[in-house]
Image: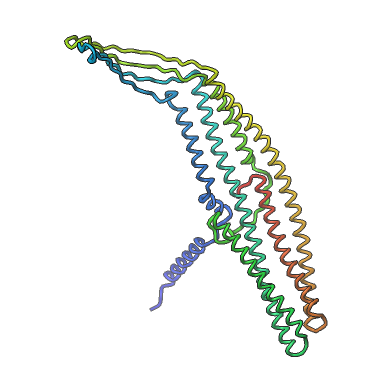
Amino acid sequence: MTSHPLGSRLRHCISLTLLLAGATAWAEPTLREALDKAWERAVQARVAQARTGEADASRAAADSWFAEPPSIGLSEKSDRFNNNRGGREREIELALPLWLPGQRAAREAFARSDAQDAQAAQTAARLALAGELRASIWNLAAAKAESEIASERLSTAEKLEADVLRRQKAGDLARTDLLLTQEETLAAKGSVAQAQTHERQALGRLRVLAGLDGMPSAADEAVAAAAADPHPRLALAQAAVERASSQWKVVTTDRRNPPELSIGVVQTRDAFAAPGTSAVRIGIRVPFGTEARNAPKLAAANSQLIKAEAELRQTMAEIETEQQEAQSALDSADAVYQAAQSRAALASERLALQQKAFSLGELGLAEFMRVRAAAVEARLDLLRARYALSAARAGLNQARGILP
């Protein structure tokens, strides 16, 4: 029985779709996805959520009808413990704390600035976490490069040792040459073990930070054309100033405890046989404001405002300095990378020529190994410079407040 061409094509399309879906599911996360994973695991995320809840509570308090929660009171006066004639007075009272003039508007302004501060703190915390993630990624990249070079060095050393052993048995090389290659092989094994340890440590730090088991895809970043506007750290400092200023305004409008409007119902009876009477009582209680109450609050609010303004100026200076340093580091890393490229190319060409001379017996083993070691070091320096350049680009974006 032959299968229908349309059904065969349909099965092929379904298989291809499932294959692509599986490849997508197992693909390495991007840098932004890695940051999202790190944020889900970060302590800063829990703190930001709690801070947002605090801001919501400030908004709820400002939206309340009363300055403080209402209260209810119940009292009774009776003559049962003296002449017991049946005299009695019962009262139930509802106390309603009232807003002072301008106090509610000040609380609402504080709630808005508090919410802005909470949002700015969350963005700044995410930027700080991005800096940790970027550093961790490029530390892992450098460690992997050193591990790969060390493995290549070991493989080359083992091949050279085997070649020298063959030539030593043939009488072309001395026993000392074989011992030299064996020492090089042992040294290469030690370098491999050390490099692999560094790679595992770097991977462990990245796994703890973001739960990743390897480098994210497309980790290389292009340098942003301009800094973030506003910079998350600067936005946080500005929001802190606005919050402190709003808090100071709240304190200046809160010169006394809120006045209370009381509404009560009084029921009285003069004797057991006497009819009871009811009356409604309305009262107002206005507390006084004193220096002993207000001075500490005003001083604390003023201190917070001065501190926030000073931190804003310091943050502005720090951001400017960090961006200049990051740009200088990028320029330096680019120059180092260009030089490393040229050096690695020259070392590779020289190694190819010297290897041919060694094979023909025109070059001693010690000199050849020195040339080979220089070529390996040049390759390692090139990889280090390559990843240092990528890290410098990420560092400049970090200094400019750019999130992945």
Residue under the image location 67 percent in, 45 percent down: 400
Say which quarter of the image contains residue 369. bottom right
87 left or right of 199 in image = left
Q: Could you tell me residue 30's position as x and y percent? A: 57, 56
Say which quarter of the image contains residue 304. top right
Of the pair 15 and 356, the residue shown nearer to us: 356
Residue under the image location 47 percent in, 27 percent down: 62
Relative height, residue 100 to residue 207 (above, below): above
Say which quarter of the image contains residue 215. bottom right
11 left or right of 30 in image = left
- Residue extending furthest left? 273
Of the pair 353 and 287, the residue shown nearer to us: 287
Q: How many marks?
A: 0
342 left or right of 189 in image = right
Q: Could you tell me residue 80's position as x and y percent? A: 22, 15
Relative height, residue 308 to residue 319 (above, below): above
Q: Could you tell me residue 353's position as x and y percent? A: 80, 76
201 left or right of 265 in image = right
Relative height, residue 374 to residue 50 (above, below): below
- In the picture, the quarter occupied by the N terminus is bottom left
Relative height, residue 398 to residue 368 (above, below): above
- Residue extending furthest bottom? 170
- Residue extending furthest right? 362
- Residue extending furthest front? 82
Q: Could you tell me residue 136's position as x and y percent? A: 61, 55
Residue under the image location 71 percent in, 77 percent down: 183
Figure colour scheme: rainbow
